[in-house]
Image (cartoon, grey):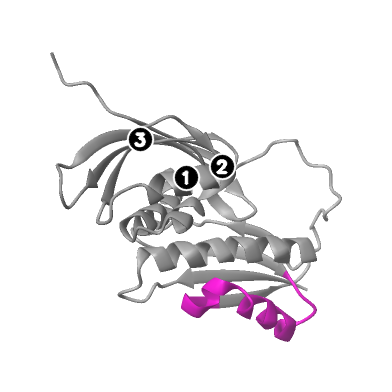
């Protein structure tokens, strides 16, 4: 049987941005597992009201009880209300083997939301001075350049942030966002790095975030500082 599930997520008040980013990442991993098992067929993002978090999913299960087991296994279920509609075959359904025009309609991607999903977790780890957790928000082969020569890989990211002074915090603002390809988003930001013993450093930051098996991760990070006006 196939089921259409309307999934509405409500994050409890007081939940940290880090916790939201972490559960989103686990949800992405679980969704891929369910797809591989044949339980999750499709996901759509319907038109959303401001601040609304809602998804439509097409699932396959033997019965409603098995479907409930599938839905319960998804990490976001703890914050989610699911409305299930069982689907019956239509007499005019062309079936899964029907020949259809080779036109691919991609669901709109909220570029800012993708960037915030990654950067909120990055910021929380930077503010907490946890270098390895900062590095976990990057791909294993990420190209990273802060305010010194570049490195490749998560260890270079961890080493860079480990060298930063305790008390350093980051505040970012998204200036531009673009989808370059499926699973690849470019972000251009302004970031204020504040310190306890020196003036705040304001930089421009370009990032490429990539949809991986671990969820969205930063694959390229490059900081630049504008020269003072003449």
Q: Which quadrant of the rendered structure holds the C terminus?
A: top left
Instruction: Give the class, few, some or many, for how many residues have Cα within 10 Å of label 2's Cα (few <14, many ≥20).
Output: some
Q: Position of residue 113 (x, y in %)?
A: 42, 51
Quadrant the N terminus occupies: bottom right
| Mark 2 vs mark 3, CA separation in Å | 18 Å
In the image, which is nearer the foreground, mark 1 or mark 3?
1
Label at residue 153: 2
Q: Residue at coordinates 50% horizontally, 42% vertically from top-left? A: 156
Q: Is residue 176 left or right of residue 53?
A: left
For this rendering, which residue is in front, 181 or 51?
Answer: 181
Question: Could one spot residue 117 in this view of the protein?
Answer: yes
Q: Nearer the viewer, residue 165 or 202?
A: 165
How many C-alpha atoms fall within 10 Å of the one at disc 1: few (<14), some, or many (≥20)? Answer: many
Q: Give the foreground label among 2 and 3.
A: 2
Q: Which residue is mark 3?
A: 205
Helix, strand or loop for disc 1:
helix
Residue on which the image places disc 1: 157
Of label 2 and label 3, which has the lower sequence position? 2
Q: Which comes before the other along the chain, label 1 or label 3?
A: 1
Residue 179: percent from the left, percent from the top? 50, 36
- Left or right: 110 with respect to 213? left
Q: Is residue 171 left or right of residue 186?
A: left
Q: Is residue 80 magenta?
A: yes
Q: Answer whether residue 110 is magenta in the image.
A: no
Check contact, mark 2 vs mark 1: CB within 8 A: yes
Residue 9, horizontal then vertical, whole percent: 46, 71
Residue extent of the magenta highlight: 60-82
Q: Residue at x 31, y 75 (%)?
A: 13
Q: Main secondary structure of the magenta part?
A: helix
Towards the viewer: 204 or 200: 200
């Amino acid at each position: 049987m196939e089921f259409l599930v309307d999934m509405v997520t409500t994050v409890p008040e007081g939940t940290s941005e880090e916790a939201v980013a972490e559960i989103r990442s686990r949800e992405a991993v679980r969704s891929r597992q369910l797809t591989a098992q044949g339980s999750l067929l499709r996901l759509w993002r319907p038109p959303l009201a401001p601040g609304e978090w809602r998804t439509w999913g097409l699932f396959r299960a033997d019965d409603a009880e098995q479907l409930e087991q599938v839905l319960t296994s998804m990490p976001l279920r703890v914050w989610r209300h699911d409305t299930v509609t069982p689907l019956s075959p239509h007499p005019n359904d062309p079936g899964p083997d029907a020949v259809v025009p080779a036109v691919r309609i991609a669901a709109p991607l909220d570029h800012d939301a993708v960037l915030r999903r990654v950067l909120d977790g990055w910021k929380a780890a930077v503010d907490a001075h946890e270098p390895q957790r900062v590095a976990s928000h990057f791909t294993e082969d990420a190209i990273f350049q802060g305010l010194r020569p570049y490195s490749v890989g998560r260890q270079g990211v961890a080493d860079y942030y480990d060298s930063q002074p305790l008390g350093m915090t980051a505040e970012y603002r998204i200036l531009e966002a673009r989808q370059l390809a499926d699973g690849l988003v470019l972000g251009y930001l302004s970031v204020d790095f504040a310190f306890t013993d020196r003036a705040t450093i304001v930089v421009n930051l370009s990032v490429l975030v990539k949809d991986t098996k671990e969820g969205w991760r930063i694959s390229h990070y490059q900081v630049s500082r504008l020269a003072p006006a003449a």
